[in-house]
Image: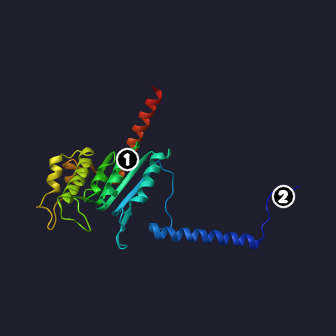
């Protein structure tokens, strides 16, 4: 009779055990570096979570001491959510001070054009270009203590003092205003009043809206946290499933 089990010496078994221990140790070290914990909880979910933290880094590299989110890292994730049949919804968590206008607007346009439902949750702050990102989702929440700063766009580097520069600024500003008003319930005149206010910020132009103020003025849909955001997203996913079933029947 042929033995179907492969014989392994004590040395070989010991070597494999050491390799396994080393691999587990490397994974633990990587988790500590990237996530701040030894073992990340793993389970299958139909929701993908994307976090946008710090400044949004676009075409220009930010200094190494800045906490940033690279938009070229986010774009493939959004595409993967749209393509993966196992993922049915996107949870977007924001705590951003703004950043590259073109990059932030590009991400916002991608999210709003998804066929799958999405929910955004503003924690801490959703400032500047973070506002279009927050309203790009199918439904938006903001924590009661979170803030959103609405202000005109700024530019770093060389600025040429000619009328064409102002026209360029004005066109870019109009793009952002149009996107926000199209994907939220805030009125155009109210948004412009907040954006160009000189009474709110000490050394700047703009307005800071705290949680309930953002909801009251129609910028964000509702006050809420993680539980509310996940519950809403699951209800949107359920509605999307039912809509697909109706289409198949018809």
Residue 80 lies left or right of residue 141; in this view the side is right
Q: Residue at x 39, y 51 (%)?
A: 91
**Front one among 17 and 169:** 169
Q: Residue at x 57, y 71 (%)?
A: 25
Residue 224 shows in this picture = no
Q: Residue at x 14, y 53 (%)?
A: 193
**Front one among 7 and 55:** 55
Residue 100 shows in this picture = yes
Query: Circle 1 — which element?
Result: strand
Q: Residue 87 placed where, x, y %?
A: 47, 47
Q: Is residue 229 above or below residue 124?
A: above
Few, some or many C-alpha atoms within 10 Å of disc 2 (few <14, some 14-19, many ≥20)?
few
Residue to which mark 1 is pinned: 118
**Front one among 36 and 51:** 51
Q: Residue 137 placed where, x, y %?
A: 33, 48
Residue to which mark 2 is pinned: 3
């Amino acid at each position: 009779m042929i033995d179907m089990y492969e014989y392994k010496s004590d040395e070989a078994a010991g070597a494999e055990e050491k390799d396994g221990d080393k691999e587990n140790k490397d994974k633990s070290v990587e988790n500590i570096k990237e996530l701040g914990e030894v073992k990340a909880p793993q389970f299958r979910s139909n929701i993908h979570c994307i976090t946008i933290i710090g400044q949004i880094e676009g075409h220009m590299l930010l200094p190494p001491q800045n906490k940033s989110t690279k938009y070229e890292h986010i774009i493939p994730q959004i595409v993967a959510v749209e393509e993966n049949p196992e993922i049915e919804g996107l949870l977007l968590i924001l705590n951003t001070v703004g950043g590259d206008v073109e990059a932030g607007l590009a991400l916002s346009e991608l999210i709003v054009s998804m066929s799958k439902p999405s929910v955004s949750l503003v924690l801490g702050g959703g400032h500047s270009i973070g506002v279009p990102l927050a309203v790009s989702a199918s439904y938006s929440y903001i924590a009661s203590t979170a803030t959103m700063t609405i202000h005109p766009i700024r530019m770093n580097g060389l600025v040429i003092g000619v009328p064409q520069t102002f026209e360029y600024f004005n066109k870019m500003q109009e793009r952002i205003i149009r996107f926000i008003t199209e994907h939220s319930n805030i009125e155009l005149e109210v948004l412009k009043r907040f954006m160009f206010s000189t009474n709110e910020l000490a050394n700047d132009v703009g307005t800071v809206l705290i949680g309930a103020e953002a909801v009251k003025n129609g910028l964000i849909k509702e006050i809420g946290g993680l539980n509310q955001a996940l519950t809403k997203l699951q209800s949107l996913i359920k509605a999307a499933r039912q809509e697909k079933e109706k289409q198949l029947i018809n």
